[in-house]
Image (tube, rainbow, N blue to C red):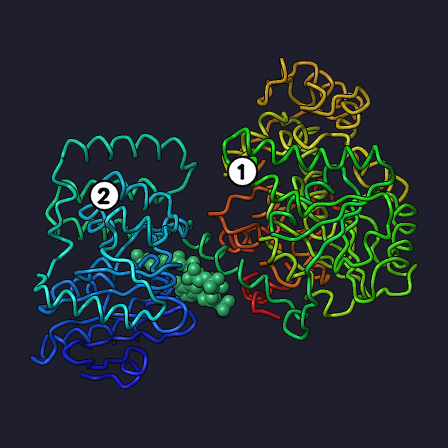
């Protein structure tokens, strides 16, 4: 049966006695049902045609095959399955050669493993990243890879999900040849011809002897299981991967394939797969803002950074690491020396860890220059200020930038809460002013909130997204408000957490409950890490405008008044004896909490971990809904990405809004209404949440790109 559309997507062309099979399914040749059908038709045709002595499979465009079509997961499966297609390729009576350029990932590599020989050219990316999607290689990857590479190398490749290049693939034995030219079809055909000339046999990966050394395999599997149990932190699929590779070691191929299928379907059904795939697509959708569609970014060839403190130095390193020249401005020589030292400290740390050479540091710093004269910014395409968080200081600074920067330079502020519209209003070019809110450490944290003031021009927003891409950051478009997206939502769920502490839950129980949800740290550990003085300053700043009717928990202030700011002062909510990184509970803190409960007239009650989590998430989700409702975030997925990349939200849950959809919005709304009986002012259900529940819709229904 020939399916016309399949033949369009998978074309066959006889070149002499070699059948060239080309997959052409933009954008990345994902293995959707049409591609699977087309491959099957092609292999059947090759087997049936006596004129065909070999088959070469290539991908059109920039990639071989990106993998299974992730968009198909969760939908009813359509035949043929990818395992069946791979088995049919492997069973072909003619030589099958996979010629790889670009990505051969997941199912893409599994197709190549089912071929009899594999060639790749420079720039190829091979890997089995299914674990990053909460899955495992489900088309023979857990059975063929160990047979080809041995259990240890296979487990490393599959459990890490990492991409490897052609050279490493050749060394490992994943491929047989590296092609020299960039013409992948020519390379594949030439290699096929060579194999035919040499009468190379049909060589099935299922028959490879990588698992012959049972003892080595057993040792590798036991070690992987122990290591994975320790570090997979609640993830479901990694241990299933070990089980599948163990099956490859212990069972015949077909039985191993059956077990792989069973384990794959278990992973597919896990909510973790849904969360991780949501994160995968959200990271791509978040790059699509109205301005990135409508405007062309300005060129960014050189950067200015005003301020050499923690943030200024971090931003400088991020730009230097992106290959950009950076000029740092500080108010005087001493401050500039400190700024440069802050930059060098980052690189010296990497050298100390053996992750950077001194020469590489020196080469990078050739692109760094410093000055105390703003005139040094005259040629910068984009300037980011990271000076003291005071609106008057910032306004004065923007006046200087307005005076010295060339026309068209983007003028950005790294402020975490000050009014960017005010900064823009004071200069002659408000259309060039934008917020670039980095997260500390700015050279490490991926999240970059791109804060869009009222008068900014679309091409400046597009330029900010382009800048984020250069720095390999994950940009999220945010509207101007106190805290933008992340810190605004944080302020709300922090209040919920402080209220629970005052009502009877210890900070240590709360931290444990939140860590068990999947966070690396609990909220009180985070405060101790970041420094309690930061939140204290924010509370003092908001005090004049705080609603006097609103509940205010004073416990955090009691600690700050004692200078107990956390790790940097040796104690905060926890004690850090001898500068330990992991704190211990502090009886004096518990005594302060008891005294505050007494002062507030509160009779403490117990909380279950489950209730702690429900309150924590209800507050986060509700404020996330408000942020979307008020247009501060474009879509719920923008809130998800903010919390995945800026606040340690467990990735396999997809983010707070995805998690809310998983729990069910009616449940979240019911919780909020129940909590409102104690504190109606704090627990006000978001109009967006109410509307979605009334319509029987969920947050994901709002995620189509704007
Ligand atoms: N399925 C569907 N769409 C995909 C896709 C995929 N596998 N990979 C990418 N896309 C979309 C992506 O959403 C974007 O869409 C566009 O293609 C360009 O992607 C059975 C079960 C291949 C390295 O995990 O790593 O195989 O935004 O921006 O930067 O064992 O895409 O344009 O609408 O990322 O050039 C395993 C995932 C799947 C690889 C290219 N494979 N993809 O990077 O482009 S599970 C993966 C990537 C599996 C089997 C199992 C990258 C890339 P839009 P992009 P890129």
Q: Which residue is mark 2?
A: 245
Percent position (x, y) of residue 70? 39, 62
Q: Nearer the viewer, residue 293 or 328?
A: 328
Packing grade of label 1 (10 A; few <14, some 14-19, many >=20) is some
**Which residue lies at the image location 23% right of the left edge and 45% below the top edge?**
244
- Residue 112 circle label: none
Is 504 situated above or below 416?
Answer: above
Residue of label 1: 519
For ligand 1, the image quadrant comes to bottom left
Frontmost residue, 701 versus 296: 296
Query: If the image is split into quadrants, where does the N terminus sit?
Result: bottom left
Q: How many marks?
A: 2
- Label 1 to label 2: alpha-carbon separation: 29 Å
Residue 407 location, x and y as percent? 83, 66
Which residue sits at x=68%, y=31%?
527
Would you call the spot at circle 2 few (<14 residues within 10 Å), some (14-19), or many (20 or more)?
A: many
In x, y percent, where is residue 673? 65, 49
């Amino acid at each position: 049966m020939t399916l016309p559309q399949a033949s369009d997507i998978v074309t066959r062309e006889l070149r002499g006695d070699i059948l060239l099979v080309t997959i052409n399914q933009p954008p990345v040749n994902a293995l959707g049902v049409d591609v699977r059908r087309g491959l099957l038709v092609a292999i059947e045709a090759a087997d049936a045609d006596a004129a065909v002595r070999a088959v070469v499979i290539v991908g059109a465009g920039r990639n071989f095959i990106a993998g299974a079509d992730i968009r198909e997961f969760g939908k009813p499966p359509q035949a043929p399955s990818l395992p069946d297609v791979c088995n049919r390729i492997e069973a072909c009576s003619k030589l099958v050669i996979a010629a790889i350029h670009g990505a051969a990932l997941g199912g893409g590599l599994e197709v190549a493993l089912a071929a009899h020989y594999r060639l790749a050219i420079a720039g190829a990316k091979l890997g089995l990243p299914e674990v990053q999607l909460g899955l495992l290689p489900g088309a023979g990857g857990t059975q063929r890879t160990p047979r080809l590479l041995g259990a240890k190398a296979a487990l490393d490749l599959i459990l890490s999900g990492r991409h490897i290049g052609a050279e490493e693939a050749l060394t490992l034995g994943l491929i047989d040849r590296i092609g020299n030219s960039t013409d992948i079809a020519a390379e594949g055909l030439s290699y096929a011809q060579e194999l035919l000339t040499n009468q190379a046999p049909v060589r099935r990966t299922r028959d490879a002897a990588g698992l012959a050394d049972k003892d080595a395999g057993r040792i590798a599997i036991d070690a992987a299981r122990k290591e994975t149990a320790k570090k997979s932190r609640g993830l479901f699929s990694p241990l299933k991967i070990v089980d599948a590779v163990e099956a490859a070691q212990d069972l015949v191929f077909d039985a191993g394939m059956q077990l792989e299928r069973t384990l794959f379907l278990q992973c597919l059904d896990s909510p973790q797969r849904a969360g991780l795939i949501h994160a995968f697509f959200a990271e791509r959708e978040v790059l699509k803002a109205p301005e990135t569609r409508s405007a062309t970014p300005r060129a960014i060839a050189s950067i200015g950074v005003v301020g050499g403190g923690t943030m200024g130095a971090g931003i400088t390193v991020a730009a230097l690491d992106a290959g950009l020249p950076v000029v740092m401005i500080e108010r005087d020589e001493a401050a500039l020396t400190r700024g440069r030292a802050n930059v060098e400290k980052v690189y010296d740390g990497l050298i100390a860890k053996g992750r950077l050479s001194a020469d590489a540091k020196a080469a990078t710093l050739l692109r760094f220059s410093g000055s105390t004269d703003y005139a040094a910014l005259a040629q910068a395409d984009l300037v980011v200020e990271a000076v003291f968080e005071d609106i008057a200081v910032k306004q004065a600074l923007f006046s200087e930038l307005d005076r010295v920067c060339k026309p068209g330079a983007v003028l950005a502020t790294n402020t975490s809460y000050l009014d960017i519209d005010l900064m823009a209003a004071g200069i002659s070019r408000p259309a060039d002013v934008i917020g670039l809110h980095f997260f500390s450490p700015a050279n490490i944290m991926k999240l970059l909130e791109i804060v869009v003031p009222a008068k900014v021009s679309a091409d400046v927003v597009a330029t900010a997204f382009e800048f984020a891409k250069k720095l390999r950051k994950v940009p999220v478009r945010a509207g101007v408000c106190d805290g933008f997206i992340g810190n605004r939502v944080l302020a709300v769920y922090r209040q919920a957490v402080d209220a629970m502490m005052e009502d009877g839950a210890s900070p240590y129980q709360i931290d444990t409950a939140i860590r068990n949800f999947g966070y690396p740290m609990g909220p009180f550990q985070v405060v101790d890490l970041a420094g309690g003085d930061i939140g204290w300053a924010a509370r003092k700043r908001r005090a004049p405008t705080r609603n006097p009717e609103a509940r205010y928990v004073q416990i955090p202030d009691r600690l700050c008044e004692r200078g107990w700011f956390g790790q940097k002062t040796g104690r905060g909510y926890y004690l850090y004896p001898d500068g330990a990184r992991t704190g211990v509970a502090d009886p004096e803190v518990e005594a302060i909490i008891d005294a505050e409960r007494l002062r507030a007239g509160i009779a403490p009650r117990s909380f279950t971990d489950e209730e702690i989590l429900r309150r924590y998430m209800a507050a986060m989700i509700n404020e996330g809904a408000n942020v979307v409702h008020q247009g501060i975030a474009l879509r719920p997925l923008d809130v998800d990405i903010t919390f995945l990349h800026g606040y340690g939200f467990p990735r396999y849950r997809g983010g707070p809004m995805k998690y809310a959809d998983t729990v069910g919005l009616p449940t979240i709304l019911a919780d909020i209404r129940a909590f409102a009986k104690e504190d109606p002012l704090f627990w006000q259900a978001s109009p967006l949440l109410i509307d979605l529940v009334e319509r029987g819709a969920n947050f994901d229904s709002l995620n189509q790109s704007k």
